[in-house]
Image: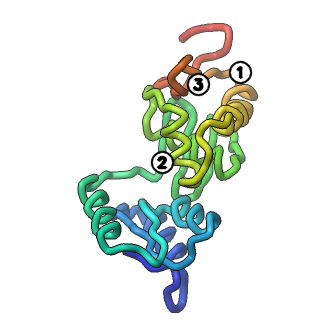
Amino acid sequence: MLDVMLPGCSGFEVCERLRGEGVWVPVLMLTARGAVGDRVAGLDGGADDYLTKPFHLDELFARLRALIRRGPVPRPTLLVVGDLRMDTAARRCWRGDDEIVLTAKEYALLEMFLTQPGTVLTREVLTEHCWDFAYEARSNVVDVHVRGLRDKIDRPFAVSSLETVRGAGYRLRRDGGRIEGRSR
């Protein structure tokens, strides 16, 4: 458990330092700061969960049990699929030698895809990982952000790596993509 309001530096900074050093122990942020921006900063900074005060002890214990059940998960700082790679510690992304600048949402989406290449990720799963808990899942916001992500990671490179699986969701090709118009 990591409190956001620590003397000397914030819990956000501590969590980011841990993740930057490759320390992947489960982190539950515990704080009175419950604004959406604070929760996003905590989760994007590497926290596995975020709980605001006041809270019920039963909920805290349930969240801790859930983190423990996940067990140790080695998380590399460099995610690579084909010639697409992401440095999660530095929060940078490249296709080949070309660096790609992403928005926070595009980064969160791409990180999900890179950690599970070949797996179909539903809009609900993507919404749960990349947006606020109270977000309206029936909108087309995931589709809009996936289109923006394709405009950055695929189209400029004449590659098709992010596939739509009709009626199910999206998937990142295990090979990192194919040249458009040809199959590999």
What residue is at 29 percent from the left and 63 percent from the top? 62
Which comes sooner in the sequence, label 2 or label 3?
2
In the rendered image of this protein, does residue 50 appear above or below residue 128?
below
| Residue bearing mark 1 | 158
Classify mark 1: helix, strand or loop.
loop
- Does residue 42 appear left or right of residue 49 in this picture? right
63 left or right of 108?
Answer: left
Quarter in which the C terminus is drawn:
top right
Q: Position of residue 183 (x, y in %)?
A: 57, 9
The residue carrying mark 2 is 78
The amino acid at mark 1 is Ala
Query: What residue does disc 3 label?
Result: 161
Residue 19 position, x and y percent, is: 45, 64
30 or 110, nearer to the observer: 30
Q: Residue at x 63, y 41 (%)?
A: 94
Q: Quadrant of the N terminus?
A: bottom left
Give above or below for 18 relative to 175: below
Q: Secondary structure at mark 2?
A: strand
Instruction: Give the CA distance from mark 2 to mark 3.
Output: 18 Å
Q: 118 above or below 2?
A: above
Three-letter residue code for mark 3: Ser
Mark 1 Cα-neighbour bin, 10 Å: few <14, some 14–19, many ≥20:
few
Answer yes or no: do the residues labelled 2 and 3 have beta carbons within 8 Å?
A: no
Give me the residue at 52% from left, 61% from top.
43
Seen in the picture, residue 166 relative to 45 is either above or below; the reply is above
Q: Pointer 1 and pointer 2: residues touching (CB < 8 Å)?
A: no
Q: CA distance from mark 1 to mark 2?
A: 24 Å
Residue 167 on image: x %, y %: 54, 19
